[in-house]
Amino acid sequence: MRDESAATMPARPSGGTTPLAASVARADAPGPAGRPSRRSAYAALDLGTNNCRLLVAEPASHGFRVIDAFSRIVRLGEGLGNSNRLSEAAIERTIEALRVCKAKMQARGVVRAKIIATEACRLAVNGAEFVERVRNEVGLDLEIVDRQTEAYLAVTGCAALADPYSESVVIFDIGGGSTEIAWLDGAATNPSADPTLRIRAWDSLPVGVVTLAERHGGSDVTRLTFEGMVEEVADLLARFAIRAAPAANARHFHLLGTSGTVTTLAAMHLRLARYERRRVDGLWMSDADVGEAIDDLLDTRLEQRADNPCIGRDRADLVLAGCAILEAIRRAFPSDRLRIADRGLREGLLMNMMREDGVWRRGSYR
């Protein structure tokens, strides 16, 4: 079901003064008693409809330093649109990935962790059963977060890349089962300020690369098929587009996107022989650059996409569905610039935990 609060001014998620104030899962590895120290390791795990991603980091000035990471395509939500259940094969793939994540957290001596699941577990009738199975078989406390929390986390994780002179930014995160989008109004104040305080409107669209590709097909995508996907997303986006219409009229307005879709387009634009995060994260692309990259992908066959090292076989049938979601956003909010973020929910989780623990004081690292 679509979140009915999306068309109104967003209320802060309940339970605290930050967007994420739910219970915190602690890793099994021992750590210092009481509040984590400045050298403590934090972990953030985002289990989405398509991917399982982990970051382990230590606090640094105005941010953090990554000391370990893991990412695996698990397709937890595969076939969910047809059965409303997480399949046994998808669950087993995911549990295997979660075991790897737990081992990494233990090896790094993580003292505080946040482990979340999103759209696939929200929709599945056996979502709660899956959470219990993860607790019993892996020993991790997985929390299914609501759509507002997910949208706020995306903003928290990406907002540092917004143009500081921009008075309006639309941030979006194209996921496997849902797409989060938010309008930030007003210029940023300082690097450690909570960016969610600038949110004027947000929405969580019940469509992502997996669900859209399963409905329209992701292997052989014609331009007619592509337009059909764009139109479906545009209908879901319409309410938010009306609410956030003033955004595009503000000075230095731009789009800021995170997902495998936008990072793939950036890698294609740069003509990378292999994916390089340091060159992609923070890249500015013009509207013409984005359009050209999408056109180039539309001219490829499935085998060509699978052979592209910046896409790969696991995502070859999903990337054009992601492009259709991006195209709907571009049409709703025309902008000369799109900034690419290779960051998102995990970074938002880490920033929130460190902010809650007071690792930065008055803009400086203690």
Image (cartoon, grey):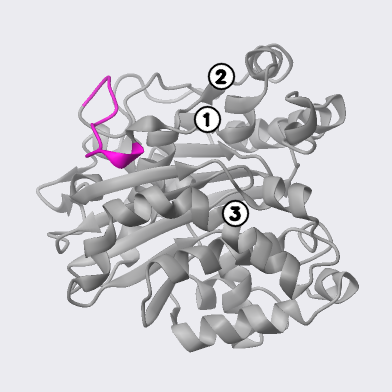
Q: Quadrant of residue 177?
A: top right
Which tag, 3 or 1, sits closer to the chain's start?
1
**Would residue 221 be visible to someone looking at this image?**
yes
Residue 289: image x %, image y %? 52, 87
State which region is magenta: 6-16
In the figure, is residue 330 to the left or right of 268? left
**Residue in view at x 21 percent, y 46 percent:** 194
SS at mark 2 in the image: loop
Q: Is residue 37 magenta?
A: no
Label 3 vs label 2: CA separation?
Answer: 35 Å
Name the disc covering residue 115, or none.
1
- The disc placed on residue 141 is 2
Q: Which residue is mark 3?
A: 232
Label 1 CA crowd tier, 10 Å (few <14, some 14–19, many 20+): many
Instruction: Report whether residue 66 is seen.
Output: no
Eyeballing the image, is 147 above or below 29? below
